[in-house]
Image (cartoon, grey):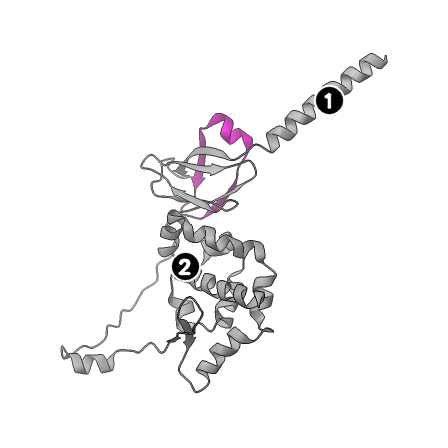
Amino acid sequence: MKKIVLFFFALSGIGVSAQVEEDVMPPQTLQATVVNAQTDFPLESVHVINLTRVVGTITNPEGKFAITAAANDTLYLSYLGFKPQKVRVTNDMFRFQDTKIALTELAYALEEVVVRPYQLTGYLEIDVKNLPVNNAYQYSISGLNKSYEAGSKSPSAVTKVLGAILNPADLLRNLFGKRPQQMRKLRQMKEDDNIRDLLASKFDRETLTQLLQLERMDIEDILNNCNYSRSFIQTANDLQILDAISSCYEEYKVLNRN
């Protein structure tokens, strides 16, 4: 009887060991195909980002892609005119290598747009005076990596910039200090060309919020407290926003060490 029980536990141990080994499989190349959910046609140039490992790629003309991933990683797929989608990677996706991921088209209600062009005269001196002026100003501070945008020009503009950088009680400490893991992803994102290309074409902050696990309001708070102008926050593309957050974070780390 004892021999039977010992044999049973030995088999159970082998099964548990095999399960653990399967769950902790190292990252490998995942291949899949992205299709239109309505037509089942493959979609080319879909951006695919592994949010867990911060790497990206795009689909080829047959809708296929290959990306480094492991079980339980999260993929984020985005394509113009289609609803973005998150996909959890499973072991079966590696076993069969014929996974199809379907994206659903978005229905847009197009509203009438009135275009109001500037009334140009053809005379440069006159037209320059009539064009709107961007009042965002940049200040270069010794010891920091890049110029610093302070927003609208005012007597306290420079003081606000210096205060935001030199004040140890600034809100930046809370925003960055509570999210070290998300902020560490910044450098990885900046080094991946596919992610940079995607962000350069987007203005909706959706991919940024997914990558950094931040709310859109958090991103605006960070930029506000780094004294970036409202016009920059509203009009910059996602890559410019990423670079701005990264620059501000690097400055925060220097101050935090001091």
- Mark 2 residue element: helix
The amino acid at mark 1 is Ser
> Does label 1 or label 2 sit earlier along the sequence?
1
On the image, numbered disc 2 is attached to which residue? 238
On the image, numbered disc 1 is attached to which residue? 12
Measured as percent of width and height from the top left, residue 209 is found at 50, 56
Q: Magenta segment: does it hold 219?
A: no
Quarter of the rendering containing residue 103: top left
Which residue shows up at 18% across the image and 83% down it?
A: 126
In the image, which residues are magenta? 82-105
Report whether 119 appears left or right of 160.
left
Report whether 167 appears left or right of 29.
right
Q: CA distance from mark 1 to mark 2?
A: 51 Å
Measured as percent of width and height from the top left, residue 202 is found at 38, 56
Measured as percent of width and height from the top left, residue 139 is found at 40, 76
Which of the pair 6/34 is nearer the observer?
6
Which of the pair 80/69 is nearer the observer?
69
Residue most toward the bottom? 155
- Mark 1 residue element: helix
The amino acid at mark 2 is Asp
Other residues around mark 2 within 10 Å, as few (<14) / some (14–19) / many (≥20):
many
Which residue shows up at 55% across the image and 68% down it?
A: 255
